[in-house]
Amino acid sequence: MLRELRIENLLLIERAELRLGPGLNVLTGETGAGKTVLAHSLDLLMGGKAKKGIVRVGTPEAWVEGVFDLPPEWHQDRELADLMERVPAGSEEVVLGRRVSETGRTSAFVGGRSASASDLQMLASRLIAFYGQHEHRRLTIGSNQLAMVDGAAGLGQQELLGEYSKIFKRHRDLNRELEELLGRDMARERDLGLLRFELGEIEAASLIEGEKQGLSEERDRLRHSEGLREAAAGAGARLRGDEQLEGATGLLAAARDSLSGLRGVDPVLDELSGRVDSLALEAEDVGVELGRYLDGVDADPGRLAELEERLDLIDRLERKHGGSVESVLAHADWCRGEIDRLEGGESREAELSEEIATAAAALASVAGEIGAARKRAAAGLASRVTADLGELAMDGAELTIDLPPEEGGPGPHGAESAEFMLAPNPGIPAQPLRDTASGGELSRVMLALAASGTGDRRTLVFDEIDAGIGGNTAVAVGDRLREVADGRQVLAITHLPQVAGRASTHFSVEKQAHSGAVSAVVRTLDEEAVVSEIRRMMGAGEDDEAATRHARQIVAANR
C-alpha cells in the first residue's frame, strides 16, 4: 500500500504531501488545477522518463517520494536481493524517490540510497498498477495478461508454477550443456592435444612445492663459490695460523697459559681468565668449522648449469600457468579433469539425452495441468468481465481470452500465452485488446478485470477512468471502484461526484495565485469539505441548498 506521496517543485505544485489510506482514495479539482501532477509523479516513481519542463519554474530541481508498505515476501525474492540490501533491517516500509534537475537529468533512490530508474521500475511495478488515458501498456503485454489468467485460476497460491519453473530451468540447462558439448566435438581432439601436452610438460618436470627456494640458494652458492672459498680459507688461516703467521688460536692459548698460573689469587682475574678460556675454545671450534666448510664448497660448473636449467624450467611453467608452483600444479589437476570430461564426452551426450527426455516429459505433464487450469479460469474470467462491461457503458461488448500455444514449445511461463480479445459491439469480430479499445474502454476493462478476481493486490491507480461518461454509468463506475477497493488500495483521479462521493479518503487540488505566481495546493478534505467539493463538482454554488442537500446525501450514503 502507498502510505505517503511527497511532491516538491513539480509543475504547479510547490510542496504537497498526500497521506493515503486503505480503500478508495480520490483526487478532484478544477480542470487545469494540477490533477495531472499526480500522474506525472507516479510515472516518475515507476521509472518513467521526466517530461520536458516538469520542474517548477524558478526552482533548481523537483522531488517525488513514495512511502510504501514493504511486502514481507521481498526478503526471500532472489531477483530483489541486491536492492533489499539498501533497506534497513527490520524495516516495514520502503521509500522510493526520484529527483529531476532543471536540466532534465534525473536521479533515483531506494531507501535513501542511490539506485537506477530500472531499479525503481522493478520495485514500483510490483507495488502500483497505473491506468490512465495513455497508460495501458500493462494490458497490452501478453505476459501480464497471462498473469491475470493465472491469478483468476489461483495458480499463485499453488505450487504448480514453481514446480514448472524448476523443471523448465533444468530442461533448459541440460539442453545448453548438450549444445555446448556437441559444439565442441570438432574442437575436442585439438583441445585434448593441447591439454595432454600441457599436462605432460608439467608431469615431466616433477615439481615439488618449496623446492625453488632451496635450488635458488644452492645456485647462489655455486655462483660465488670462489669467493666463498677464499673468504673461508683466509679466515681459517688467521684463526689457526700458518708458517708465516701465528693464528688467533695460538695467541689465545698463550694468553690462557699466562693467566693459569695465578688462578685462585684474585676473583676478578679468575673471571677474566675464564673468558679467555672461552674465547680460545670458540676460536678453535670456528677454525675447525671453517675447514669443514672449505672442504664442502662445491665449484662444480656442471652442477651450476643443471641448477640454472631446472630453475629456468620452473620459471617458464610459472609464467604460463599462474605465477607459482602451486598454481602450476593446480593447472595440472584442471587439465586432468578436462581430459576426463572430453574423453568421456560421448557417454555424457547419451546421459544428457536421457535426462532431457525425462525433463521434457515432466515439463509437458506439469504444463498440461497448468494449461487446463488456465483454460477453465479464462472462460470464467471472460464471462464475468463481459457481464460487467454492460454496466460500464459498454453494452454489447464481449471479452474473450485466447490461449495460443507458445511457439517452439513450452516457454518460461508455460505451454501457452494469453491474448485478451475485445469485440466492442455485436457483430464486430473480436480483435486483440491493444488494437481495438480506446483509452476509456481499456480503463473500464481493467476495472472489470480487477473486480473479477485476478489476484492482483497492488495499489490500483485510475487517471480519468470516468472520462466521457456520466449518469447511471458514472454511478456504476463509482460502485465498481468502491467494490474493488474493498480490502485493497485504489486511487482515482476523477471529475465526477458519483465517483468522488464513494471515497474513504478525499484529496482536492486547487490553483492559487500569490505574488504574481501560480501554484497548486493539495488538501485532505474532512466531511464538510467533501460536501462542498462534491457540490462544486455538480456545478452548483454555495447558496444552492438543493445541491448542498444532494451532496450531503451522496456523502452520507457512502459512509
Image (cartoon, rainbow, N blue to C red):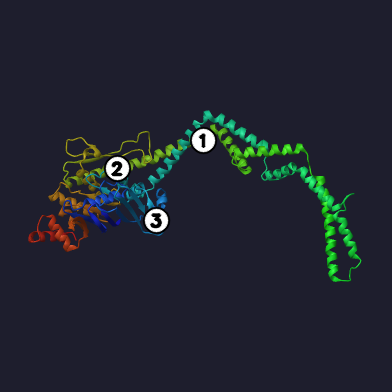
Residue at the image position 54 percent from the left and 33 percent from the top: 345
Report the front residue among 345 and 292. 292
The answer to whether 345 is drawn above or below residue 264 in the figure is above
Crowdedness near tag 3: few (<14), some (14–19) or many (≥20) residues, C-alpha within 10 Å: some
Q: Position of residue 460 (x, y in %)?
A: 26, 51
Crowdedness near tag 1: few (<14), some (14–19) or many (≥20) residues, C-alpha within 10 Å: few
The span from disc 1 to disc 2 (Cα, nearest Å) is 38 Å
For badge 2, the amino acid type reads: Gln
Residue at the image position 89 percent from the left and 68 percent from the top: 263
Q: Specify the quadrant of the image occupied by residue 556.
A: bottom left
In the rendered image, which residue does mark 2 sit on? Answer: 145
The span from disc 3 to disc 1 (Cα, nearest Å) is 45 Å
For badge 3, the amino acid type reads: Val
Residue at the image position 85 percent from the left and 62 percent from the top: 277
In the rendered image, which residue does mark 3 sit on? Answer: 87
Report the front residue among 505 and 170. 505
Location of the C terminus (image quadrant) = bottom left
Q: Secondary structure at mark 1?
A: helix
Residue at the image position 75 percent from the left and 42 percent from the top: 222
The span from disc 2 to disc 3 (Cα, nearest Å) is 31 Å
Q: Secondary structure at mark 2?
A: helix
Location of the N terminus (image quadrant) = bottom left
| Marked residue nearer the N-terminal end (1 or 2) | 2
Q: Seen from this angle, which residue lies furthest right?
A: 261
